[in-house]
Structures are given as C-alpha cells and as structure tokens.
Amino acid sequence: MTTVYLNGQFMPASEAKISPMDRGFLFGDGIYEVIPSYHGRFVGFKPHIARMQDGLSQLSIDPALHLADWQSICQRLLSDNRNTNGDNQAVYIQVSRGTDSKRNHAFPANIKATVFAYAFPIAPEPIADKSKATTFNVVTGQDLRWQRCHIKSTSLLGNVLHYQQGYASGAQEILLFDKDANLTEGAAVNVFVIKNGVIATPPLTNKLLPGITRLLLLDILRKHSSITVEERDISEQEVFAADEIWLTSSSKEIAPVLKVNEHTVGNGEVGDVWLAAQKLFSQHKYDELV
Ligand code: PDD
C-alpha cells in the first residue's frame, strides 16, 4: 500500500483528503517539485529544495519547513514505499497556499499552506551506452505560455497543452520558440544544442524553468571536461543545423533527440558528445554542488 505525506502526517494514499476549496485546486496556486532517487539516494536533493523554497517565497507561501524537515519527509517516503515501488523512486512534493472558506483571488490572511508529497516508481537510471539510450522525436511550436516560466508552478495548463500538441502529432516532446524565434525549452524538459563539439543551452530568464538536471550538467561539464559550454540565445536555424540535440529532466537525465519535425538531427544517430556527457553525468550526479 502506498504511504503519502499530507500536512504533517504519513498515511495510506486512500486516507489523504484535501478540500475542494484548496487554492491549489481552485487556482493552481502552488509550487511543486519532482526529485529522483536510485537505490535510496536522491539526485540533486539540495538544489531541488532550494528551487522550491525560492518559488514559494516568490509566491509568499511559507510552509514553515526547512531542509532537514524535507530530508526526513522524503527519506521516509522512500523507505515506506520501497516494497511497493522498488529501488528507483521519485518524490513529488506540492505546496499550495492552502484552503480558504471562499473563492477570492486575493491572498487570504492566516491560512496554512497545504503540503502533500508521495513517492512513485521511475525507470532505472539511464546509462552511458549509445545502444541503450532512450531517444526522442520532437516537433516545434511557438511558446504560448505565460511570462513566469521560471516559477515551478502547479498551474501547468500551458505546458500540458504544448505537450499534448507534440503528442497529438506523434512526437514525445515539443521544442518551443519565443516570438523572436529563439529556443526556450520543451513542455517538461530543458534543451541543449551541440554544434562542432560546442554545447549550448538558452540562458536562465523568465522564459524557462531553471532545471536541476540542467544545473548539474553544466556544473559537471565545466568541472570535469574541457568541452566548451555556452548559455546563450539559440535561433531556430541553429536548432535545425545542430549535430546533436538533447532534452534534460530529472527523470530523463540527458536524452538524445533524433528527429525534429521531418528533419533528421545530425547523422540520425546518438552522438559522441552525448556519450561523453552522459558518462560524466552518471559519474558525478551525486556530487555536492559547491
Ligand atoms: N519537469 N522545464 C520544464 C517546463 C519542466 O517541467 C521540467 C521538469 C524541466 C526540467 O527540470 P528538472 O531538470 O529540474 O527536472 C524543464 C518535471 C520533471 C515534471 O513536470 O514532471
């Protein structure tokens, strides 16, 4: 049976109840995180919690929980659910502004944040082997989301509609471009483009989520390789001229893209730079960021 955490207590999932007047339900007024773990070890735990706390403070939501509290909640979810979920689990955390007696857009005074977390099984950790990589075909589209994409908000309808747009045309993700035809990100991933051995990814602005896999990968590449890494604007033409394209997220780590619309990326195979990057990522992903 699945054990979940709700507002200070661990309980069977079937007993977890949240009011329909919760602002997370009515307005999508909340922040979430997804933190992967393999064999009981989280990847990027501290930066995930730091990003969540940053999002919460931007929304003036204070669940009154600190890093050590989150550590014990998440570790307990892993151990309580290991029999059901197996060795590889992610923890989903959602903090909403809380439940009010009426529906009013203004932030209510004196309500308590709703804190929910549960663990779910994920695929085994990706390995640096070209023949075992999970590859993606993507389509492209204009980014129609709001101007606060750096906040990991539970208001995900913009992302859901873009994801569905890709899915409906037979792709597994969508690459989004702003009104100047510069790359932002995917519906649920950050994007990297490789040309002549140089790795580039869009800079952190309000147009994209500051992904933790992106953060770890940039840090690892800069510390442990001599590959040039650039954070800069990337045009649509550059995407189509790339030798390799990667998608990054907590569950995928670094995933090669082989097709964009009808266009084949590079030589149509998983690339050498991907192999080098995934190898380094696998080696160093548990290192602490300094
Ligand atoms: N998605 N960009 C968007 C819009 C995302 O939703 C995500 C993650 C990422 C990658 O971030 P990270 O490396 O921190 O996982 C980028 C999560 C996993 C989700 O919504 O399920």
Image (tube, rainbow, N blue to C red):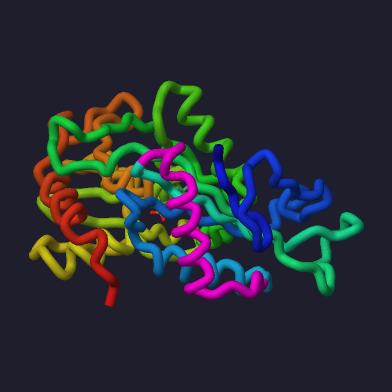
Res. 148 visible in picture: yes
Q: From the viewer's perspective, is 79 left or right of 4?
A: left
Q: Position of residue 237 (x, y in %)?
A: 29, 44
Q: Nearer the viewer, residue 63 or 177?
A: 63
For the C terminus, which image quadrant? bottom left
Q: Position of residue 177 (x, y in %)?
A: 44, 46
Res. 233 visible in picture: no
84 falls in the magenta region:
yes
Vertical arrangement, residue 194 with respect to residue 284, above or below: above
Q: Residue at x 42, y 44 (%)?
A: 82
12 falls in the magenta region:
no
Identity of the residue furthest to the bottom in this view = 290
Q: Position of residue 199 (x, y in %)?
A: 20, 55
Q: Position of residue 39 (x, y in %)?
A: 30, 49
Q: Residue at x 80, y 49 (%)?
A: 19
Q: Nearer the viewer, residue 257 or 176?
A: 257
Vertical arrangement, residue 50 with respect to residue 22, above or below: below
The quadrant holding residue 198 is: bottom left
Q: Nearer the viewer, residue 220 or 142?
A: 220
Vertical arrangement, residue 229 with respect to residue 60, above or below: above
Q: From the viewer's perspective, is 279 left or right of 103?
A: left
Highlighted magenta segment, given as a residue range: 62-86
Q: Residue at x 53, y 70 (%)?
A: 69
Q: Main secondary structure of the magenta part?
A: helix
Vertical arrangement, residue 39 with respect to residue 141, above or below: below
Q: Residue at x 24, y 42 (%)?
A: 126
- Count the marks: how many? 0
For the N terminus, which image quadrant? top right
Identity of the residue furthest to the right in this view = 102
